[in-house]
Image (cartoon, rainbow, N blue to C red):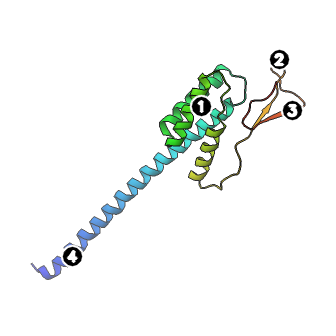
């Protein structure tokens, strides 16, 4: 056997296999991180929508359930600051004074935009709410109420 020819071939083969393994492992780790990030963004985006939907509206069973679920999702997947604001909002909801989700919504919006590599926005989120008649029909005059940290009057 000619070791002078076989040794470089074995070293080259082993380095190729090792390189392939390292690249595959790095790819699996990157893919797992991307999937984890995508799931987190999807859950927090849905939590944002549920919080926004329940904000500045007369509470119903559906909006209460949505807000409870959103708070749970933020506590599970949010950043420490998001969790602190979610807990504060939940505690404020349990108190006698009206609670505002504006600060939590702002933080969620800003963090989600950063995660999605979108430009930051100035100011807080604003909600469009249409007044409804007592019979539940939407006001034909399209009198929107835009939330800016306070519930609509009336």
Q: Residue placed at 37% from the left, 59% from the top?
A: 26
Sequence order check: which comes first, mark 1 or mark 3?
Answer: 1
Q: Nearer the viewer, mark 2 or mark 3?
A: 3
Residue 42 tag number:
none
Q: Position of residue 111 (x, y in %)?
A: 58, 48
The residue carrying mark 2 is: 135
Distance CA(mark 2)–CA(mark 4): 84 Å
Residue 89 tag number:
1
The residue carrying mark 3 is: 143
Q: Secondary structure at mark 2?
A: loop
Distance CA(mark 4)–CA(mark 1): 66 Å
Distance CA(mark 1)–CA(mark 3): 28 Å
Q: Is residue 25 positioned above or below 72 on the image?
A: below
Q: Secondary structure at mark 1?
A: helix
Image position of 58 (left or right of 29): right
Label pair 4/3, CB-CB below 8 angstroms = no
Distance CA(mark 1)–CA(mark 2): 31 Å
Q: Position of residue 88 (x, y in %)?
A: 57, 32
Q: Within 10 Å of the Cα at label 2, are there few (<14), some (14-19), or many (20+) other Cα atoms? A: few
Label pair 4/1, CB-CB below 8 angstroms = no
């Amino acid at each position: 056997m000619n070791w002078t020819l076989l040794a470089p071939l074995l070293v080259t083969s082993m380095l190729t296999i090792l390189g392939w393994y390292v690249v595959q492992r790095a790819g699996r780790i990157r893919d797992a991180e991307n999937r984890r990030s995508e799931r987190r963004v999807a859950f927090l985006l849905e939590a944002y929508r549920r919080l926004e939907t329940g904000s500045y509206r007369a509470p119903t069973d559906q909006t209460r359930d949505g807000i409870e679920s959103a708070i749970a999702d933020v506590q599970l997947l949010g950043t420490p600051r998001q969790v602190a604001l979610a807990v504060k909002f939940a505690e404020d909801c349990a108190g006698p004074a009206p609670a505002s989700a504006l600060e939590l919504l702002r933080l969620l919006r800003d963090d989600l935009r950063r995660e999605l590599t979108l430009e930051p926005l100035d100011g807080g989120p604003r909600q469009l709410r249409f007044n409804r008649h007592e019979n539940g029909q939407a006001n034909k005059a399209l009198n929107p109420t835009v939330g800016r940290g306070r519930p609509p009057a009336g």
